[in-house]
Amino acid sequence: MLTQPAQITPPATERAVAALSVAAEMLEPLFLEHSQRVYHFARLHAERLHIDPDPELLYIAALFHDTGLAMPGEGEPQRFEVDGADHARAFVRAHGLGVDAGDLVWRAVALHTTPGIPGRMEPVTAALHLGVLTDATGFGLELLPSAAVEQVVVAHPRGAFKEGFLAAVVNGLRDRPETANGTVNADILEHFLPELVLTSTVDRVRNSRWKS
Protein backbone atom coordinates (compact mmCIF):
# COMPACT_ATOMS: atom_id res chain seq x y z
CA MET A 1 0.00 0.00 0.00
CA LEU A 2 1.22 3.50 -0.83
CA THR A 3 2.26 5.62 2.11
CA GLN A 4 1.31 9.27 2.53
CA PRO A 5 4.39 11.49 3.03
CA ALA A 6 3.89 15.00 4.34
CA GLN A 7 3.75 16.66 0.92
CA ILE A 8 0.89 14.33 -0.15
CA THR A 9 -1.18 15.16 2.92
CA PRO A 10 -3.45 18.23 2.82
CA PRO A 11 -3.34 20.73 5.69
CA ALA A 12 -5.41 19.61 8.67
CA THR A 13 -6.44 23.06 9.86
CA GLU A 14 -10.08 24.01 10.39
CA ARG A 15 -9.82 26.58 7.62
CA ALA A 16 -8.44 24.03 5.17
CA VAL A 17 -11.28 21.64 5.96
CA ALA A 18 -13.79 24.48 5.52
CA ALA A 19 -12.19 25.46 2.20
CA LEU A 20 -12.55 21.91 0.90
CA SER A 21 -16.21 21.89 1.94
CA VAL A 22 -16.91 25.19 0.19
CA ALA A 23 -15.00 24.18 -2.95
CA ALA A 24 -16.92 20.90 -3.09
CA GLU A 25 -20.14 22.89 -3.37
CA MET A 26 -18.74 25.06 -6.16
CA LEU A 27 -16.91 22.51 -8.29
CA GLU A 28 -17.80 19.37 -10.18
CA PRO A 29 -16.02 16.28 -8.79
CA LEU A 30 -13.62 16.19 -11.76
CA PHE A 31 -12.42 19.70 -10.90
CA LEU A 32 -12.36 19.11 -7.17
CA GLU A 33 -9.93 16.23 -7.73
CA HIS A 34 -7.94 18.40 -10.15
CA SER A 35 -7.68 21.17 -7.58
CA GLN A 36 -6.36 18.78 -4.95
CA ARG A 37 -3.81 17.33 -7.37
CA VAL A 38 -2.72 20.88 -8.16
CA TYR A 39 -2.01 21.48 -4.47
CA HIS A 40 0.11 18.35 -4.13
CA PHE A 41 2.03 18.96 -7.34
CA ALA A 42 2.61 22.56 -6.21
CA ARG A 43 4.06 21.26 -2.93
CA LEU A 44 6.33 18.87 -4.81
CA HIS A 45 7.58 21.65 -7.07
CA ALA A 46 8.15 23.88 -4.04
CA GLU A 47 10.25 21.18 -2.43
CA ARG A 48 12.23 20.77 -5.65
CA LEU A 49 12.88 24.51 -5.87
CA HIS A 50 13.59 24.92 -2.14
CA ILE A 51 10.82 27.45 -1.64
CA ASP A 52 8.41 27.36 1.28
CA PRO A 53 4.82 28.39 0.49
CA ASP A 54 2.36 28.56 3.37
CA PRO A 55 0.59 25.18 3.06
CA GLU A 56 -2.81 26.47 4.19
CA LEU A 57 -2.85 29.44 1.82
CA LEU A 58 -1.54 27.31 -1.03
CA TYR A 59 -4.27 24.74 -0.38
CA ILE A 60 -6.98 27.42 -0.36
CA ALA A 61 -5.62 28.92 -3.57
CA ALA A 62 -5.53 25.52 -5.25
CA LEU A 63 -9.09 24.68 -4.21
CA PHE A 64 -10.47 27.99 -5.49
CA HIS A 65 -8.34 28.50 -8.59
CA ASP A 66 -11.00 27.21 -11.03
CA THR A 67 -14.15 28.23 -9.17
CA GLY A 68 -14.56 31.22 -11.46
CA LEU A 69 -15.29 28.89 -14.38
CA ALA A 70 -18.30 27.42 -12.62
CA MET A 71 -19.42 30.52 -10.72
CA PRO A 72 -18.77 33.84 -12.49
CA GLY A 73 -18.89 36.93 -10.33
CA GLU A 74 -21.60 39.53 -10.47
CA GLY A 75 -21.30 42.67 -12.56
CA GLU A 76 -19.25 43.10 -15.72
CA PRO A 77 -17.84 39.87 -17.17
CA GLN A 78 -14.21 39.37 -16.25
CA ARG A 79 -11.54 36.71 -16.60
CA PHE A 80 -12.53 33.51 -14.83
CA GLU A 81 -9.20 33.61 -13.00
CA VAL A 82 -10.21 36.93 -11.46
CA ASP A 83 -13.62 35.55 -10.47
CA GLY A 84 -11.86 32.65 -8.77
CA ALA A 85 -9.44 35.04 -7.09
CA ASP A 86 -12.37 37.07 -5.76
CA HIS A 87 -13.97 33.90 -4.36
CA ALA A 88 -10.70 32.86 -2.73
CA ARG A 89 -10.05 36.25 -1.14
CA ALA A 90 -13.62 36.42 0.19
CA PHE A 91 -13.15 33.01 1.82
CA VAL A 92 -9.82 33.97 3.36
CA ARG A 93 -11.14 37.21 4.81
CA ALA A 94 -14.33 35.56 6.09
CA HIS A 95 -12.19 33.04 7.97
CA GLY A 96 -10.04 35.56 9.77
CA LEU A 97 -6.80 35.39 7.84
CA GLY A 98 -6.54 39.12 7.22
CA VAL A 99 -5.99 41.47 4.29
CA ASP A 100 -2.43 40.43 3.44
CA ALA A 101 -3.31 36.74 3.27
CA GLY A 102 -6.39 37.53 1.21
CA ASP A 103 -4.39 39.60 -1.25
CA LEU A 104 -1.72 36.90 -1.52
CA VAL A 105 -4.26 34.22 -2.36
CA TRP A 106 -5.95 36.62 -4.79
CA ARG A 107 -2.69 37.17 -6.70
CA ALA A 108 -1.93 33.47 -6.83
CA VAL A 109 -5.32 32.56 -8.26
CA ALA A 110 -5.60 35.56 -10.58
CA LEU A 111 -2.20 34.84 -12.15
CA HIS A 112 -2.32 31.06 -12.26
CA THR A 113 -2.63 30.89 -16.07
CA THR A 114 -0.38 33.88 -16.83
CA PRO A 115 2.95 32.86 -18.40
CA GLY A 116 6.23 34.34 -17.29
CA ILE A 117 5.18 36.23 -14.16
CA PRO A 118 4.13 33.90 -11.29
CA GLY A 119 7.53 32.23 -11.10
CA ARG A 120 9.08 35.58 -10.11
CA MET A 121 6.62 36.13 -7.29
CA GLU A 122 6.07 34.84 -3.75
CA PRO A 123 6.17 31.06 -3.12
CA VAL A 124 2.38 30.53 -3.01
CA THR A 125 1.93 32.20 -6.40
CA ALA A 126 4.92 30.47 -7.99
CA ALA A 127 4.06 27.03 -6.65
CA LEU A 128 0.36 27.22 -7.60
CA HIS A 129 1.26 28.18 -11.18
CA LEU A 130 3.58 25.18 -11.49
CA GLY A 131 1.03 22.82 -9.94
CA VAL A 132 -1.61 23.93 -12.41
CA LEU A 133 0.76 23.57 -15.36
CA THR A 134 1.76 20.08 -14.29
CA ASP A 135 -1.77 18.78 -13.90
CA ALA A 136 -3.23 20.51 -16.94
CA THR A 137 -0.41 20.05 -19.46
CA GLY A 138 2.14 17.72 -17.90
CA PHE A 139 4.69 20.54 -17.72
CA GLY A 140 7.54 19.62 -15.37
CA LEU A 141 6.10 16.18 -14.62
CA GLU A 142 9.45 14.54 -15.32
CA LEU A 143 11.04 16.71 -12.62
CA LEU A 144 8.87 15.30 -9.83
CA PRO A 145 9.44 12.01 -7.98
CA SER A 146 7.47 9.37 -9.88
CA ALA A 147 6.41 7.57 -6.69
CA ALA A 148 4.97 10.78 -5.26
CA VAL A 149 3.16 11.55 -8.52
CA GLU A 150 1.64 8.07 -8.44
CA GLN A 151 0.46 8.63 -4.88
CA VAL A 152 -1.23 11.88 -5.86
CA VAL A 153 -3.05 10.31 -8.80
CA VAL A 154 -4.15 7.31 -6.75
CA ALA A 155 -5.52 9.61 -4.03
CA HIS A 156 -7.16 11.96 -6.57
CA PRO A 157 -7.83 10.08 -9.84
CA ARG A 158 -7.71 11.99 -13.11
CA GLY A 159 -10.65 10.21 -14.74
CA ALA A 160 -11.51 11.83 -18.09
CA PHE A 161 -9.81 15.05 -17.08
CA LYS A 162 -8.33 16.13 -20.42
CA GLU A 163 -11.61 16.38 -22.30
CA GLY A 164 -13.56 17.39 -19.19
CA PHE A 165 -11.19 20.29 -18.60
CA LEU A 166 -11.42 21.54 -22.18
CA ALA A 167 -15.22 21.26 -22.16
CA ALA A 168 -15.44 23.17 -18.88
CA VAL A 169 -13.34 26.03 -20.25
CA VAL A 170 -15.56 26.28 -23.32
CA ASN A 171 -18.77 26.11 -21.28
CA GLY A 172 -17.49 28.55 -18.68
CA LEU A 173 -16.33 31.15 -21.22
CA ARG A 174 -18.83 30.68 -24.03
CA ASP A 175 -20.93 33.63 -22.85
CA ARG A 176 -17.94 35.88 -22.07
CA PRO A 177 -15.40 35.00 -24.78
CA GLU A 178 -13.77 38.43 -24.91
CA THR A 179 -12.52 37.92 -21.34
CA ALA A 180 -10.22 35.23 -22.73
CA ASN A 181 -8.56 37.65 -25.13
CA GLY A 182 -4.81 37.60 -24.69
CA THR A 183 -4.92 34.57 -22.39
CA VAL A 184 -4.08 30.90 -22.81
CA ASN A 185 -7.81 30.17 -22.95
CA ALA A 186 -8.36 32.01 -26.23
CA ASP A 187 -7.02 29.17 -28.38
CA ILE A 188 -9.29 26.68 -26.58
CA LEU A 189 -12.33 28.75 -27.50
CA GLU A 190 -11.14 29.24 -31.07
CA HIS A 191 -10.56 25.49 -31.45
CA PHE A 192 -13.97 24.40 -30.18
CA LEU A 193 -15.96 27.42 -31.38
CA PRO A 194 -14.66 27.95 -34.94
CA GLU A 195 -17.39 30.51 -35.61
CA LEU A 196 -16.01 32.72 -32.84
CA VAL A 197 -13.84 35.66 -33.92
CA LEU A 198 -12.09 37.34 -31.01
CA THR A 199 -11.03 40.95 -31.25
CA SER A 200 -7.30 40.99 -31.87
CA THR A 201 -4.75 43.51 -30.64
CA VAL A 202 -4.21 44.47 -34.28
CA ASP A 203 -7.91 45.33 -34.51
CA ARG A 204 -7.75 47.40 -31.33
CA VAL A 205 -4.76 49.39 -32.53
CA ARG A 206 -6.03 49.97 -36.07
CA ASN A 207 -9.59 50.79 -35.00
CA SER A 208 -8.67 53.11 -32.15
CA ARG A 209 -9.72 56.77 -32.16
CA TRP A 210 -6.23 57.89 -33.05
CA LYS A 211 -5.73 59.06 -36.63
CA SER A 212 -2.24 57.63 -36.85
Image: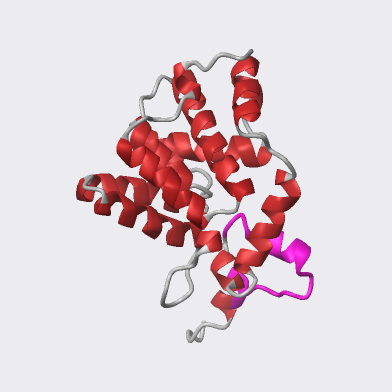
Which percent across, then down, holds residue 102?
A: 28, 49
Reply above or below: 108 against 11. Answer: below
Q: Is residue 200 magenta?
A: yes
Q: Which residues are magenta?
A: 183-203
Reply above or below: 137 against 205. Answer: above
Residue 73 picture quarter: bottom left
Residue at image position (48%, 74%) is 77
Which percent across, then down, holds residue 126?
A: 44, 36
Q: Is residue 90 magenta?
A: no
Camera sees residue 121: no
How was the colour assigned to the protein in this rendering?
secondary structure
How many numbered marks have been drawn onto this rendered protein structure? 0
Which percent across, then down, holds residue 149?
A: 62, 23
Which percent across, then down, holds residue 203?
A: 61, 76
In the picture, measured across the screen, residue 15 lies left or right of residue 37, that is left
In the picture, measured across the screen, residue 85 lies left or right of residue 29, that is left
Residue at image position (62%, 58%) is 185
Residue situated in front as seen by the camera: 165 or 123: 165
Of the 4 image quadrants, the one containing the N terminus is top right
Camera sees residue 164: yes
Residue 108 picture quarter: top left
Residue 139 picture quarter: top right
Residue at image position (21%, 47%) is 96
Reply above or below: 48 against 96. Answer: above
